[in-house]
Image (cartoon, rainbow, N blue to C red):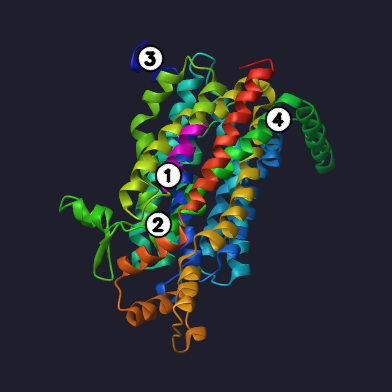
Amino acid sequence: MSKANIFNSFPKTFWVANTLELFERWAYYGMFTVLSVYLTNPVSEGGLGFTDNQRGVMQGVATALLYLLPILGGAIADRFGYKKVLLSAFVTLAAGYFAMGHFSTYATVFASFLLVAIGGAMFKPIIVATVSKTTTNENDTLGFGIFYMIVNIGGFIGPFVASKLRDLDWGYVFIMCTVVILFNLIILYFYKEPSVETKEKETLSESLKKVITNTGTVLKDTKFVMFLIIMVGMWTMYMQLFFTLPVYITQWIDTSDIYNSLPGFLAPVLGAIDNGKGVIRPELMINIPAFTIIAFQIFMSNRLKNIKPIMSMIVGISVIAIGFGQMSFSTAGIYIILGAVVLAFGEMASSPRIQEYIGRIAPKEKVALYMGYSFLPVAGGNLIGGLLSGSLYASLSNKYTFLKDYLSTKNINLANASELDDGQLYQMALEKLNLSTTELDSILFNQYDPGNIWLVFASIGIVTSVLLFVYNRFLLDKK
């Protein structure tokens, strides 16, 4: 089949849904890739100054709800219609993003993030269900590959724009997210329901009873439940790309060599000047997987179309683990780049195949509901991953904690240290020790081994791959 015929095999609604996905991901990742830094950076450096544990709880709980609530969102969409629920989702998302940029206390920022999670939960199952309903067994691998590429286009543009805006003012990031989501209201006009089945009116109690009944039916499938539980491990590991890596890069990674190696015209585009030194912001470093996926997803989808989804997932998850492990050895930015590229190929081999696998086994008349359950392991992985990110980073990798310990072992007391935030304390330590930032970071890195956190998360990925292999080897019905 020619390329033209391949792309013409998808109806208009498929492309409209993918466009909605692109802008929603633009807004979400524009916020999410900078959120860890925004929440934990010292107030003196423009952040909110929350602790690692506070960050972990907020991100874990909010993102878990974002992926858990689609179980209800899918049922609501099947009952009231996809287009109406999409409209509600976009209004809710816009309100949440706007509020996040206008509050600074922990409770109000948390509440605003929860609003974003609710809006996202209404949106997610509808778009995935639309993709599933507008593809066939002959083109579903390519269809989900295109969908995943679109996700990453939005996930690439959002952080790039956010990185430039946050250097002007953090508030501009959230204004951008709000505007981008509102633009989806225009695109929604061209969206057509993929299903024409008539929906009978039900009371709220009847709808909830139906959700409970359907939930019971789905959860009776022991093999499916086991699959969902195993996949929690993958998402626990993978979400560290957004939970932990931005903070880790900010605190530990020297990106000046990467900045200095860029051609003159690219340096100001991809980098920024921070305290007189050229750097690459962490959100652009973790954008490398998105760029890699944009470039290679169609190629990978075509190469993997004859490989069973579960086998592709087993290999892909192991490769993601290798990518994370790569990041543990040095403060040099090149190790982050190499790890991110390796991680991206593992992601291409695993993540799109998960939704493809579930999409194939879901009854067509209940696709939205079943796709809601495809987000269940993502919810568990986000919750566990967020909590682990906060607690493990606080104990294994926090530079300011190590700095305080290092100063105490050297019997160095800084004047008014209790009144300083972490950023101010660090600057005073540099002056007291007569060291450069690179020198002090190197001392702390070599003495405290903060990169060990990546070996912990990589181990979770390897265990997940082994469990998935056992699942595939000893349970029948391998799809």
Position of 143 compared to 276: left or right? right
Quarter of the C terminus within the rendering = top right
Q: Are marks 3 and 4 in contact (CB under 8 Å)?
A: no
Prevalent SS, magenta region? helix
Amino acid bearing label 4: Met
Position of 373 compared to 277: left or right? right
Q: Earlier in the sequence, mark 2 or mark 4?
A: 4
Q: Are marks 1 and 2 in contact (CB under 8 Å)?
A: no
Distance between the alpha carbons at the discs numbered 1 and 3:
28 Å
The dot on residue 155 is 1
Name the element at disc 2: helix
Amino acid bearing label 3: Asn
Q: Which residues are magenta?
A: 317-327
Q: Which residue is mark 4?
A: 226
Residue nearest the viewer, comparing 355 with 174? 355
**Residue at 60% over, 63% down:** 53
Distance between the alpha carbons at the discs numbered 3 and 4:
38 Å
Distance between the alpha carbons at the discs numbered 3 and 2:
44 Å
Farthest residue in the top direction?
A: 1
| Label 2 Cα neighbours within 10 Å, binned few <14 / some 14-19 / many ≥20 | many
x, y (%) of residue 298? 38, 25
Q: Earlier in the sequence, mark 3 or mark 4?
A: 3
Confirm whether the magenta stretch covers residue 21: no
Q: Which residue is mark 2?
A: 249
Q: Which residue is mark 3?
A: 5
Do we see residue 195 in this rendering?
Answer: no
x, y (%) of residue 80? 69, 37
**Residue 257: quadrant of the picture:** bottom left
x, y (%) of residue 314? 54, 27
Distance between the alpha carbons at the discs numbered 1 and 4:
30 Å
Above or below for 260 versus 306: below
